[in-house]
Amino acid sequence: MRVLSGIQPSGSFHIGNYFAMMKKMIEYQEKQELFAFIANLHAMTSLPRGDVLASYTREAAAGFLSLGLDPEQSVFWVQSDVLEVTELTWVLSNLTPMGLLERCHSYKDKVAKGIVANHGLFAYPVLMAADILLYQSDRVPVGKDQKQHLEVARDIAIKFNNDFGETFVVPEPEIDEDVAIIPGTDGQKMSKSYGNCIEIFCDKKTLKKQVMGIVTDSTPVEAPKDPDKCNLFAIASLFLSRDEKEDLAQRYRAGGLKYGEVKKDLVERIWEFFAPYREKREALLADQDRLHAILKQGAGKARDVAARTIGEVRKRTGLRYWV
Ligand code: TRP
């Protein structure tokens, strides 16, 4: 079974990315065939292009590799290194009804927020369908926010298969309803766009600032506190063993707990937790030739699969015009 996932290079990964998605991907590769890529073409819809896009892409690739994505065992590449995906996007565009895209929430939400949409943003789900179908993915684990995009991909696959004969695997979504939503420092879902992140690979001063900024209530120190209602507790739990978590919960309930102390301890925990990955990432970023070689090799493996699919698509659609 082939599992595929893409992640946009958004600058720096935060612990929400890690616990909700990357950690799962890294565990997947033990059991499944994993295809994972850095979605830099998608990022063009929201990032400043040029140097920023390029450096974010390198950093995302180095970050994912350092966290344990194994480029030997899995197929790991940068989206734009396999150009077949843009060709397939065009082919699929020609069987995608406007209405299907006009109904997409993420597009509608952005327009509602006042973003002046360009065609790239509108066509985003078609490119995503091309990602999924090009590599004949069986399963695509995504968050709830991407559920509709996956339905679009399925609709397009079914339509192509009906019109031109069985060509694509119709992908199954894997929507983890109970993936804990990782709260940000303000208690909302951790997200770059809310500015409530705790980054994985920042310097220690920044980490301290972010952790100290976790919003807590104003219960007096002596009073007992409810861990289940505390955002700080939820974040800290990610880095605690079960026993440690229980201990901390008891300290909450007993009264006398200072949030500041929990935060100080959390800074150290997070710093230690990611320390080995941080070193690996630095080393990779310092050796760009090596990083590039890994990504080129990954793109080669991805292209083997892509070329087979696109060959079939060309034949069936008549883009291959000789017999
Ligand atoms: N749209 C996804 C996101 O923002 C990223 C993505 C692009 C993706 N292509 C994909 C995810 C294909 C899964 C499969 O999270």
Image: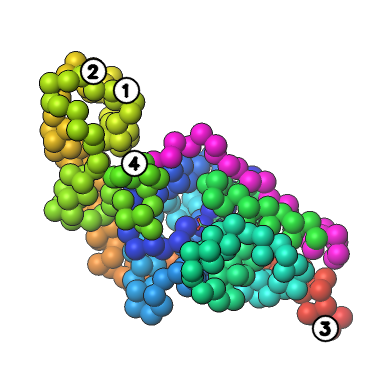
Given the image, on which type of amino acid does mark 1 rest? Arg
Q: State if disc 2 and disc 3 touch (CB < 8 Å).
A: no
- Compared to residue 287, the image places residue 271 above or below, namely above
Residue 223, x across and y down, in percent: 17, 20
Which quarter of the figure is the N terminus placed in?
A: top right
Alpha carbon of mark 2 to alpha carbon of mark 4: how far? 20 Å
Alpha carbon of mark 3 to alpha carbon of mark 1: how far? 63 Å
Which residue matches tag 2?
A: 253
Within 10 Å of the Cα at label 3, are there few (<14), some (14-19), or many (20+) other Cα atoms? Answer: few
Which residue matches tag 3?
A: 321
Disc with the residue nearer the chain's start (4 vs 1): 4
Q: Is residue 266 magenta?
A: no
Image: magenta residue range: 160-182
Which residue matches tag 1?
A: 242
Looking at the rendered structure, the secondary structure element under dot 2 is helix
Disc with the residue nearer the chain's start (3 vs 2): 2
Residue drawn at 73 percent across, 65 percent down: 99
Looking at the rendered structure, the secondary structure element under dot 3 is loop
> Front-most of 117 and 269?
117
Of circles 1 and 2, which is in front?
Answer: 2
Of circles 3 and 1, which is in front?
Answer: 1
Of circles 3 and 2, which is in front?
Answer: 2
Of circles 4 and 1, which is in front?
Answer: 4
> Front-most of 89 and 253?
253
Within 10 Å of the Cα at label 2, are there few (<14), some (14-19), or many (20+) other Cα atoms? Answer: some
Given the image, on which type of amino acid does mark 4 rest? Gly
Q: Quadrant of ligand 1?
A: bottom right
Which residue matches tag 4?
A: 187
